[in-house]
Amino acid sequence: WHSVLYLHSCKGTKGVKNVPQTDVSSRQFSHDTFEQPPMYVAVMTYLGYGIVTLFGYLRDFLRAVGLEKCHVAQEREEQKDFTPLYQDFENFYTRNLYMRVRDNWNRPICSLPGPIFDLIERVSDDYNWTFRFTGKTIHNVINMGSYNYLGFAENNEDFLKTVADKLRQYGAGVCSTRQEIGKFAIHEELEQLVADFIGVESSMIFGMGFATNSMNIPALVGKGCLIVSDELNHTSLILGARLSGATIRVFKHNNMHSLEKLLREAVCSGQPRTHRPWKKILIMVEGIYSMEGSVVRLPEIIALKKKYKAYLYLDEAHSIGAVGPSGRGVTELFNVNPADVDVMMGTFTKSFGAAGGYIAGRKELVEYLRSHSHSAVYASAMSPAITEQVMRAMKCIMGKDGTTEGIRRIRQLAENTRYFRAKLKDMGFIIYGDDDSPVVPVLLYMPGKVVAFAREMLKRKIGVVVVGFPATPITEARARFCLSASHTREILDEVLQQMNEVGDLLCLKFSRRKRSAFPDACKGGQLM
Amino acid sequence: MSAECIHMRERGVDWRYRKQRSSRGDAGCSWSCCRGDNQGVPTDRAGRMSFKNMREYLAWLYYQYLLITGIYVLEPWEKSIFNSVLFSAIAMVVYTSYVFVPIHVHLALEFFSEIIDGQPESAMALMN
């Protein structure tokens, strides 16, 4: 009986090869690529970090001796003999590397974060310790960093009419927590809509996406439970897991052998000293990992979870609305029954242009969370205007507003993703991740090149997000592009053209794959 | 409409809900296909880099050296310190190799030729 159930329910695994694929859009496995650079790149990266670290030691020495003014917080004279508060080694990296180059992060924006936006120009007179605004605005910068996958970050009056109505009706704030007096009828409507959208029984919404993870995982698991989490999970998942008090074990990224080995060992040996069986085993994965752009291997994980009787927590922050033929996320991408995933979590920040998160699943789970979640008891409920924005975005995607705008946007995003990734690979950059994910990390490796890349792209009026050491491994600094359905072909061509030039200028084309000669990117829209 | 390029028109159509601001910095279309100049390194029509003279090429090589060693992020006086230390180290290596390498090579050749010629000599001496 058990083996029949296994065969029946894991149609998507690699083991059952003779099941014909009924749907063109469903896939059996993910196509992740993580190409390795030539060896000299790693050597040069370490060399660069080493030299800057040496100079960091020199500057720290000068600061300690007093030859140089110390801009960082320092203890007072009377406290110098106490245990040191500030000059820890952990801050060494912040003081001596991040401060030198921090003009590439936290750039202030002064317009809507759509496909094109405006930046405030700021300069520094003392090597980035302080900034001042020159008063000028940099107009029409192409936005390749905002999480605006379906283009719902817009200020079109017609589309936002219902949101403005709700704002007029309810005001901006909720002034209460969910459990006390902050439950509005509009929240119930949205919860029902989210449950319909995903295809589960019921759902619950929260005001903040990060808090959805960190405040609800402690309500689901506790001491005596085991959390098996992917090594590249987001900080909110890690924080929630640590807060819960459960034992945490980590498996290699997207590696099913590592996961199976962990599960097998957990089921066989039980809890660490007493060897009692674990109360619960919860596998935590994400739909799309935002730093790699890789997609989770959902069918295989579901097969494993059924075999070892574990629960699955799927965080679809980046994948809901952005993947799948009708935007329903990774469950639709792999043609998996959403009821197989025990806890489905997602956020409204990325594809819906709002703020907040949701947890969806079976009715018993959601009812339990309504009374036991910290977020419901202590955090403010979602604002009505934001709730309406999520509702109108979701109705647009589902087609319930009577137009085909939603499906057009989803198709446009898929097309943009395929085009951009294919062209970048052709040019010779190393790109991580799956071919369908709208998150495109371009590997830059060396710290000098990371900084130079961000500055060059801003000179050419393209705003990119670059990520370095603490968020990524030390040798894999990257620039992360987030594609949007509101990027037109001309915008993408412009970005590709500039990437080509900057790639040649900075020597960033490390890929050793065979590729075709790159045709002129501007052929479509050029006047010459 | 006559002087506007395709990008300005497209901009009007696609971004109609963004108010068109007249900005001081933007004189017409700023996209690279329609601009006369190219910021940064000179490029030809196909987008490849083309250097007009040796000076530009050397400047680009210096820029690559700054990026690879990570000096690019340092302040100018730190760059000078590193460059002078590296230059003096290389100068010392060059001087030492100029003075000593011919002598070493000569000695090595002598040593090996002695072995090769020396062996038949001693074998013959033994036989005799």
Image (cartoon, coloured by chain):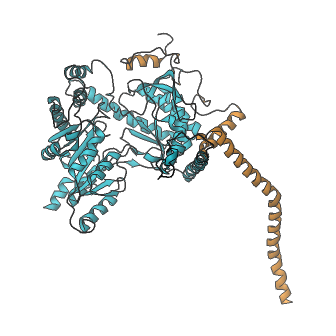
In the rendered image of the structure, the colour used to display chain A is: cyan
Q: Residue at x 47, y 35 (%)?
A: A105
Q: Residue at x 79, y 72 (%)?
A: B112
- Return the residue nearer the eye: A347 or A67: A67
The percent position of residue A438, horizontal first and vertical second, equals 37, 38
Viewer can see residue A44: yes
- Return the residue nearer the eye: B118 or A386: A386
Viewer can see residue A332: no
The percent position of residue A331, horizontal first and vertical second, equals 25, 44
Q: Residue furthest top?
A: B2
Q: Quadrant of residue A362?
A: top left
The percent position of residue A461, horizontal first and vertical second, equals 50, 27
Establish if A519 lies above or below A116: below
Q: How many marks?
A: 0
Q: Residue at x 60, y 42 (%)?
A: B67
Q: Is residue B20 left or right of residue B90?
A: left
- Return the residue nearer the eye: A210 or A84: A84
Chain shown in orange:
B
The percent position of residue A401, horizontal first and vertical second, equals 20, 25
Quarter holding the C terminus of chain B is bottom right
Q: Is residue A172 left or right of residue A134?
A: left
Q: Is residue A280 left or right of residue A413?
A: left
